[in-house]
Amino acid sequence: MTDALTIRGLSKTFGGKVAVDNLSLSVRAGELYALLGPNGAGKTTTLRMVAGLLKPNSGDIEVFGRNVLADPAAAKQIIAWAPDEPMLYDRLTPLEYLDFVAGLWGVDPKVSAPRAEELLRWLGLWDNRAERCEGFSRGMKQKTALAGALIHDPQLLILDEPLTGLDAAVARQVKDLLQERVKGGATVILTTHILEVAERMADRIGIIQNGRLVADGTLDELRARSGEGRATLEDVFLDLVGAEGAAA
Amino acid sequence: MIAAPGSALWLLRHELRLSWRGMLQKRSRGRGKFARIWLTIALPLILLVTAGLPIALGVRHRQVPIIPVANLIAAAALIMLFTLMLSQTLAAAVDALYERADFDLLFSSPLAPRKVLIVRFLAVAVGAFSIFGMVLTPIILPSAIWGHPGWLAAIVVLFCIALAASGVGLLLAAGLFRLIGPRRTRTVGQVLAAVIGAAFFLIAQARNILGGTKTASVAAVVMQFSREPRFQSPALSWPLRALLGEPLPLLAAIGIGGGVFLIANQLLGAHFAADAAAAAGAGASPARRTKAGGRVRFAASPFSATLAKELRLILRDPALIAQVLLRVLYMIPLGFILLRQAGQGHSLVLPGSAAALSLVASQVSGSLAWITISAEDAPDLLSCAPTPTRTIRQAKIAAAILPVAAMLVPVLLPLYVLAPMVALAATLGCAASMTMASLLNVWWQRPGKRSDMRRARSPSWFVTLAEVLLGLLIAAATALLAAGLFGWALIPAALALAGVLMLSRTDAQIAQALRAAS
């Protein structure tokens, strides 16, 4: 299977503090990959480097064979990045926001306009399409941002804590949407602190601590590695990062 | 003096501390210590030495004559002060409703709501008084010490005006609230405050706007009025008498100021808590729909998408519109001067006005450029898009320049008919100054929030100074070009160009500065 993402020897420091330490991992095309780790483990920093928002001190990143560092524009064309805090404009409506994002990715209006309608309808935001985002709830904002991430039909979707602060109904909607995209051939990488989500949704799971990958594989492979055959992901996670690391 | 926790005095101290810190933040641009020293020591000292002491020495053995001209001047000065304070108190009242998110905390405490409200209203009055008080006190104090103790009453009168302005401002805000709803009150309140603030300037410029034949100078008007019998009524001398400390007029001033304040409190007290609660919920309401309804014409390129987004955000930002409107108001008299002088063929005034127009254009476009470039709400979204930074920047600069250009068209187009050479010089000057201001904002950008627009927008005093100096050089070149002195115009133009080039930064330098700032 082709790799959607290949990271080799990635390192990033902030003023002497090591955030990512010689990290290497790969994510296969068409899978949903969950990147887990305690607070400050380096998950978001890693994903921000993949999205082209941060430059690493060393290492290499390839997205579907396109080098993120050498040709960022080509890589960005097929990536979508959705951080935990939605990147929205309060004074724009969802439709205007999608128009803007589609324009940034150079999507033909003949394609983006119907796609925007489809996404907003799918996410239950069509009736709110003419309202400014400033009055939206957290869930509505998150869904709008997600629609923005999908408007250019990315091959690799990177989501940082996509379910934080969402109620059960919206969280289900987002999970369904992500699984739908994976079925459609897209690759999804997400970080989450809700281990049940990773357990149920992810094809493979990576666990990162102190900027290093401590384990990587399917849930069964992780169980085997921790030596607990029927353990939950939470047990495996705590076993691998240690209780102190998990509480960080 | 230690006020008991929960007392009105204790609450007032809390309010004033917040106001003081807000004022320091507004003036300091992050240099709190400098602002504190400037406001509490340097400014009063400068005023004391340059104005207070010379005035005190000059008037030591003189009395202010109670004559119609003096009465009119005193009354006009008090009206002007009231107007200026009203613009502050109206904005502060809107802030009290919208910006401060502590009503839930205060009203859920065991403090009486009435006490909370009256203290907050009083803080609005003290806030309006403090700025003018800080200026007036060092000027009056030496005269009061040397022979005119009664003049201290001017400070009391000033506070009474602040009380009245606070009452009227709060009534206006509450009236707007009832009339047009919570959200529009914020917009209209901010714009109205800006317009009221500029009203005195516009009145002073009436001669330029209406023309010399229609109005006389302010001094001439005052002299003329003072000779009319209706302006010689003894009642008209009361403002001046109050300022000089005569007991009865002073008591009247206290009665009027305190009365207006108390009436406003009485009228608003019952509704204010409900209004504040409604205003707090206004932001969360999902019912704010755009005029375009559900129709959006999708952009065909990153440039047009970014331009459309920036223009939409500018047009939907009431605080920004209020700020820009205030600066545009200063353009109005300039425009009238230009057109009238062009029509009359006054060649000397024209170049100066063309230069001033270019200076104002650079100021307005500089503000808009700061908003579009530095106050980007979703910088990560732009960074992770495959669009070149250059394209996004160009769209943002275009968004900063286009609204100003649109405002200049009604002045420049008729000018092309009346005085083509001046119009050409003004067009070139405005274009150059707007480009300069926008480029400086690109090269020296520093991320900030849109709401910071009300505070200082420039990253440093150095850039602010550079923007003003370069603006002046371009204005000088514009004036010389408009006067037909092409060769001479090249000198300031070349200096401005050299300055712009010296301040330029590469993309890598900008990125490095942004990383350092974050």
Image: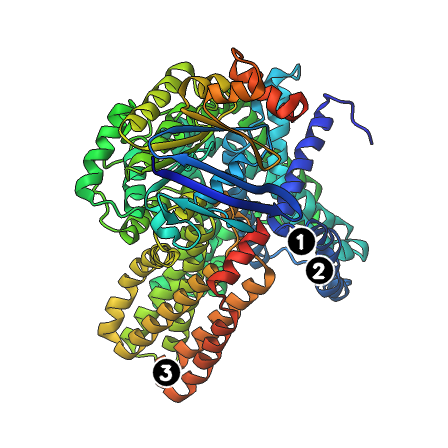
Camera-near label (3 vs 2) is: 3
Q: How far is disc 3 from disc 1 in space, using C-alphas?
A: 40 Å
Q: SS of the residue at dot 3? A: loop
Q: Tell me the residue at 39%/76% (across/down).
A: B478
Residue B440 percent coordinates (x, y): 47, 63
Q: Which residue is label 2 attached to?
A: B47
Q: Which residue is label 1 attached to?
A: B135
| For marks 3 and 1 on the same chain, the one whose residue lies earlier in the sequence | 1
Q: Tell me the residue at 53%/45% (across/down).
A: A10
Residue A165 percent coordinates (x, y): 47, 22
Q: Are marks 3 and 1 on the same chain?
A: yes
In the foreground, B365 or B407: B365
Q: Tell me the residue at 42%/61% (across/down).
A: B438
Q: Are marks 3 and 2 on the same chain?
A: yes
In the foreground, B148 or B451: B451
In the foreground, B287 or A25: A25
Question: Which residue is situated farthest in the right direction here?
Answer: B1
Q: Contact (CB < 8 A) between labels 2 and 1?
A: yes
Q: Which residue is label 3 attached to?
A: B483
Q: SS of the residue at dot 2? A: helix
Which chain does tag 2 point to? B
Q: Amino acid at mark 1?
A: Val
Q: Is residue B81 left or right of residue B139?
A: left
